[in-house]
Amino acid sequence: MKILCITSHSDTYNSIRPEAEQMIAMQSLGAQVSIMTQGESPYREKMEAAGIKFIPFLPKRKWSLKAIKRIRKELKEGRYDAVYSFNNKAIANANMAAIGLPVIVVNYRGQTGNINKLDPSAYLTHLHPRVDLILCVADAVKDSLRAQHKQPEKIQRAYKGHNLSWYNEKPADLSEFGISKSDFTVICVANNRPRKGLVSLVKAGEFINDPRVHILLVGNNLDEPNLQAAIAQSPMAKRIHCAGHRKDATALVAACQASVLPALKREGLPKTVIESMAYGVPPIVTNTGGNAELVVNQKTGIVVTPGDSQAIAKAINELIETPELAQRYGQAAKQRIAEFFTVEAGALQTLQAIEAAKQSKGL
């Protein structure tokens, strides 16, 4: 099977690693993979070493005649079986480029919500009639999109895999925040947007009485007024630390005793939760998107209702009061990633879904 993948590799090596490694795994499973992306991709050397053809081009707009012609030329000359696009600019142009060609058109979908069949712009991307297959990163994403689609059978799930060997950073020194080794630090790695629910985490401080508990917020936009007002009003104000954007976020995670993702809606399969689990740090998540597919409640972490600050506090209190429980959850979380969310499994699910789409279309 010959597959053209169109994606953006503008981020760091670590942030694009799950996607890039899955393409390498697809190549190792016998597919012929080409990638169309920025020429300066930090993964270019490794992907080319694996035999993947590298095409330095990326659509700059959601509709670009130049991009459509470039993609269509590659599809025709390369005689591809499938084109797999990973972001809206790539998806919209690839959908148009594939019209009239004997190729399976595959879209990637990474989060729940934000697609509506009454929105005309959705028909440029996932609701475009030329799309043959949409691969969702979690069952929750699949179910959300199927509710908006006339052909739900086109929508399948393929997990994006990880490897525990990627997560071996030495735990960071938290003393820069005034946190000692005897403290219990809860970390939240998330850019502050309304749907991420950081205010509900801060408000959980009203129900946490143990003075050893610190909350460490890592991400962008932490100076936003509503969040800062909530912190100022918290009885834990002096123990809530805003670290901002950090390149050593995973090392910070490894140094903490628990993690929280208090998202209110529209999650996919959050990488920050996976990183926490991979380091054996017990996660507390809300039951939105794919969170509950990652975290098995009371086995590999704790799942709470979105927006419930008291439930978040109860979970934190439970972990600090029962250290052996926290340790058990952390080890079980690490094992879950190792068993169910591997790169190889995700690559195989992807190839099987594309093959099934090919057979259904008679190609």
Image: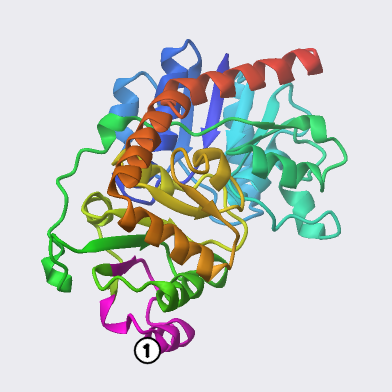
Residue at the spot x=33%, y=80% of the render?
A: 236
Residue 85, position as x, y percentages in the image: 59, 38
Residue 249, position as x, y percentages in the image: 27, 56
Residue 283, position as x, y percentages in the image: 41, 49
Q: Secondary structure at mark 1?
A: helix
Residue in the foreground of this view, choosing between 137 and 63: 137
Residue extent of the magenta highlight: 214-239
Badge 1 amino acid: Ala
- Which corner quadrant of the image does residue 178 belong to? bottom left
Specify few, some or many for label 1: CA neighbours under 10 Å numbering under 14, 14-19, or 20 or more: some
Left or right: 233 in relation to 293: left
Residue at the spot x=30%, y=70% of the render?
A: 210
On the image, numbered disc 1 is attached to which residue? Answer: 232
Q: Residue furthest top?
A: 30
For the question of whether residue 39 can be seen, the reply is no
Left or right: 13 in relation to 18: left
Q: Is residue 35 above or below residue 189?
A: above
Q: Is residue 91 above or below residue 176?
A: above
Residue in the foreground of this view, choosing between 169 and 19: 169
For the question of whether residue 168 can be seen, the reply is yes
Q: Residue furthest front?
A: 321
Magenta segment includes 224: yes
Residue 121, position as x, y percentages in the image: 76, 58
